[in-house]
Image: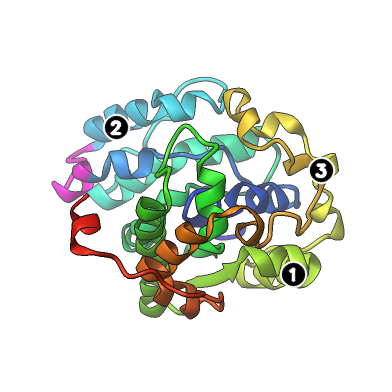
Amino acid sequence: MPAPFFIVGNDRSGTTMLRLILDAGPDVAIPPESMYLTDFAPVREAGGPADAGAAQALARQVWEHPKVALWELPGGAPAVPLAGDPQTWFRFAMEAPFSAYAAKLGKPGWADKTPHYVHHVDYLLSIWPEARVVVLVRDGRDVALSLKRMPFGPNNAWAAAQWWARGVRAGRRAAGRHPDRVTLVRYEDVVADPEGEVGRLCAFLGLRFEPAMLDLERVDRSRIVPDQASWFPTIFDGIGSDAVERWRREMPPRDQRTFAALAGDELAAHGYEPGPAEPVSPRRARW
């Protein structure tokens, strides 16, 4: 059975596309975003669960989490092992919904795609030391344009640049701390060479690569939560590069300069051309 892995990064960086590609393979099932793993971090930080009874209560809480409810799992939370320790019980409770989801789809392994976990990689690896992490990076200016259509996230270049820079810095730091467990991949490289990049990722993750995994046109559309379907209007059209460097055509020049001023170093570090930067006045910074 393959070790679990996590797809993380800034929202609107192609993490859903990568999730659907890897989920289409024979080895792992990847449910919609979990979100709950960090919700229960205080339990672990407090040294819990203290015993099997507390672990069973925790497992029920996890099973009834609103995000897990979207996975439509059969039955209730499984029984936790009576013999164990806080670390073993906590891992069991966190992992149970993923295992059930994989079993429902007849897959031997599971993985997760939750972008905001890019800020919590150390926490994930403390629970699953054998896990791997894929940090997906996309040009922040294209990310900013995409976010403007979403009901969440920063909606202007000033805020988006700083938010994006924090995310990519977190991903680079995680890769530096765990070079054998964390890999960085650019969205632009995946869409330019899907077979090569996905094949490389599968080798890193210990998965079998099959060319059919790249046929997003054939993916089961129910893999997307119904109330989020409008967020991905073209995802089932297939892998393409139409959205690459959209910022050159659609982002106002002043926004481009603002983004370069606030996140130029991070753009350059990931191989993107920052472009000219607009000096940020103290007055604007206060705004």
- Residue located at (85% from left, 40% from top): 218
Residue located beneath label 2 in the image? 58
Vertical order, 16 against 228 (above or below): below
Residue found 48% across the figure and 35% down from its top: 97
Label 1: which residue?
199
Residue 203, position as x, y percentages in the image: 68, 72
Q: Position of residue 161 (x, y in %)?
A: 40, 59
* Nearest-to-viewer mark from 3 and 1: 3
Amino acid type of the residue that numbered disc 2 sits on in the rendered structure: Leu
Residue 200 vs residue 28, the one in the foreground: 200
Which residue occupies the foreground of this view, 102 or 221?
221
Q: Dot 1: what SS?
A: helix
Q: Main secondary structure of the magenta part?
A: loop
- Residue at x-position 38% and y-position 62%: 125
Instruction: Give percent across and percent down for residue 79.
Output: 40, 30
Q: Using the image as rendered, state which of residue 271 and residue 99 is in the foreground.
A: 271
Q: Is residue 48 magenta?
A: yes
Quarter of the picture holding the N terminus: bottom right
Q: Residues within 10 Å of mark 1 (few under 14, many from 20)?
A: some
Residue 206 lies in the magenta-colored region? no
Left or right of residue 86, residue 104 in this image:
right
**69 left or right of 2?**
left
Numbered tag placed on residue 237 in the rendering: 3
Q: Residue furthest top?
A: 75
- Sort mark 3 into few (<14), some (14-19) or many (20+) by Cα contacts within 10 Å: few
Instruction: Kindly state the secondary structure of the residue where label 3 is placed.
Output: helix
Residue in view at x 47 percent, y 54 percent: 10
**Amino acid found under the numbered disc labelled 1:** Gly
Magenta segment: 42-51
Up-down relation of residue 59 to residue 179 (above or below): above
